[in-house]
Image: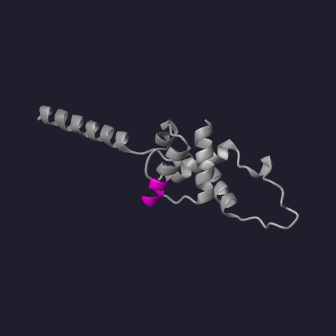
Amino acid sequence: MRNKWLWLSLLMVAIVIFIAACAQSTTAPTEQATTVELEETLTEEPEVTDEQTEPTTAEEVPDVDEVEALIIERCSKCHSADRVFQADYDKQGWSDEIDDMIRKGAEVTEEEKALMIEWLISR
């Protein structure tokens, strides 16, 4: 009887360890808030007047943290964002990879794709 409980206990511990190892981590609440703000910022289209024909200024370009948060938001729905950050492609390679993810269901706009590619190749 004692042997039965020992094996049952070991089996339960193994199951708990297996479940913990398979569980995917989720983004922290602060990262989620940042990505929601970034998403709202990227989806808003500013009004362009005739006076605003100057080239893009540094203020209009999202900062590094915003682009990183965008990548985490868009890519971690199906796999770990670490998978993206560990990959090393050139501009065309990233474009092909993101296009492939879009075909598989990733929701990435052309503007977001361009931002992500520029950030990924510049690091």
Point out the image quarter for the N terminus.
top left
For the residue pair 32 and 118, the one nearer the viewer reads as 118
* Residue 65 in sight from this viewpoint: yes
Counting every numbered tag in the picture gives: 0
**Relative to 74, is 49 above or below?**
below
Give the answer, above or below, for where 62 lies relative to 42.
Answer: above
Q: Main secondary structure of the magenta part?
A: helix
In this view of the protein, which residue sits in the foreground, 5 or 64? 64
Q: Quadrant of residue 68?
A: top right
Q: Position of residue 64 (x, y in %)?
A: 67, 42
The x, y position of residue 12, in whole percent, is 25, 40
Above/below status of 76 relative to 48: above
* Residue under the image location 49 percent in, 47 percent down: 26
Q: Which residue sits at x=36%, y=39%?
A: 21
Q: Does the magenta portion include 112?
A: no
Queried whether the magenta region covers residue 100, the answer comes back as: yes
Residue at screen point 43% across, 52% down: 78
Say which residue appears at 58% left-offset and 41% top-offset: 120
Q: In the image, residue 29 lies at what x, y percent?
A: 58, 49
Q: Which residues lie in the magenta part? A: 99-105
**Residue furthest front as drawn:** 92
Query: Residue 117 location, x and y as percent?
Result: 58, 47
